[in-house]
Amino acid sequence: MTVVSSTLRLGVCVGLWLALTGCHAVDYYQDPIQKPVPPAMEPPRELAKVSLPSYRVEPPDMLQIEMLKLVPLPPYRVDTYDVLQIRVLNTIADQPIDGFFLVEGEGVVSLGPAYGRVRVVGMTIDEATEAITRKLQEMLAKPDVSVQLAKTAGTQPLTGQYLIGPDGMINLRQYGQLYVAGMTVTEIREALRKHLSQYFDSPDATVDIIAYNSKVYYVITEGAGLGDNIRRLPITGNDTVLDALSMVNGLSQVSSTQVWIARPAPGGTGCDQILPVDYDAIARGGLAATNYQILPGDRVFIAEDNVSAFNNYLAKLTMPIERLLGLGSLGASTTRTFQTMGRNYNKNRY
């Protein structure tokens, strides 16, 4: 009996030990966040920020293009509603010719009451200069004529805002499309000048980015069993962990103070970088050691509160039972009500 009792007690103890130390869910990120960051990978932080690399545009960034010079390729032939700048020396004293002249719908320019009209449509600038000179020689001794193209009516304006499409292109309307994804502002300007050289003589433009939409980071708030919340936020180049938390109105009611940054590995090497954040230190103590600078692609993860998670787990587990008991109680109450109503009716009859 003694041997049996000892064996039984030993079996019970082993069973309890196995029950207490059985399989448990292990958070993959729990162990890495306790390890210090290697010195070679020391990340930028609040008081030691770095400037981000040259911004390379991607869909759906927005560009602002301002054309500085847009002159058609020679030989350009004057068209209706073009604007010519005409200057003439040795004119009548009170009838100067110096200004901008519109090519009218009939294809002529009006030089004034004293000089009449000259047909210039379909001519090159040199031919228009000769035609105007011949016309003025009828009234002037030695007119010295200078003609320049000031504005073309058929040239579509290119100055404006351009959205980079999913294919990495910007649409220049009648001048085709230009691929700009992955380029810096300087590279876009050179590519634009080269592309427009097919249509214009030495075009020049300025390019700027007015909407930085492609470089973002994520703030993930664990939902304590009720589903995670994910916010996608644009990078400004000056964001820190506190900035990220302020964008999601701080820690929620189901969040703990356990926060870390999951940083994607460069080059897709598969070695994630986990940066633990001491929330109490940076929020209450003003210590900047773990108030890291946010980089494009970072995931700021806010872990759930274990008590809230356990409470929500119990609520989800007992909810079906409570519903079944509630339905049973409602059915029994309804039955008793009908039975009572029947008795009262019978009593009233007799």
Image (cartoon, rainbow, N blue to C red):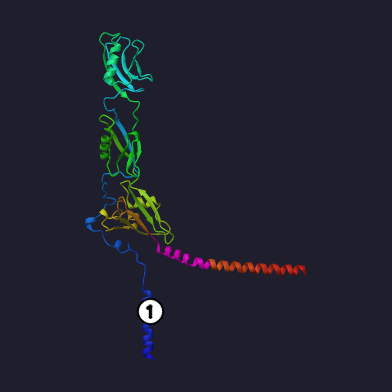
Q: Is residue 213 above or below residue 157?
A: below
Q: Main secondary structure of the magenta part?
A: helix
Q: Nearer the viewer, residue 106 or 69?
A: 106
Residue that lies at the very extreme toward the bottom in this rendered image = 1
Give above or below for 119 relative to 191. above
Q: Which kind of residue does numbered mark 1 sit on?
A: Gly
Which residue: 38% across, 84% down? 9
Compared with 250, 144 (above or below) is above
Nearer to us in this view, 151 or 344: 151
Q: Quadrant of residue 268?
A: bottom left
Kindly identify which residue carries mark 1.
15
Please name the residue shown 36% across and 49% down the image.
233
Task: Name the residue located 67 percent from the left edge and 67 percent from the top edge.
Answer: 338
| Magenta-colored span | 303-322
Q: Which quadrant of the figure contains the N terminus?
A: bottom left
Percent coordinates x, y for residue 79 in the rendering: 34, 23
Q: Position of residue 214 (x, y in %)?
A: 33, 46
Q: Secondary structure at mark 1?
A: helix
Q: Is residue 312 above or below residue 132?
A: below
Horizontal arrangement in the rendering, residue 314 relative to residue 6 (left or right): right
Q: Is 311 inside the magenta-drawn segment?
A: yes
Is residue 122 found inside the magenta-colored segment of the image?
Answer: no
Residue 256: give x, y in percent of width and height.
Answer: 38, 60
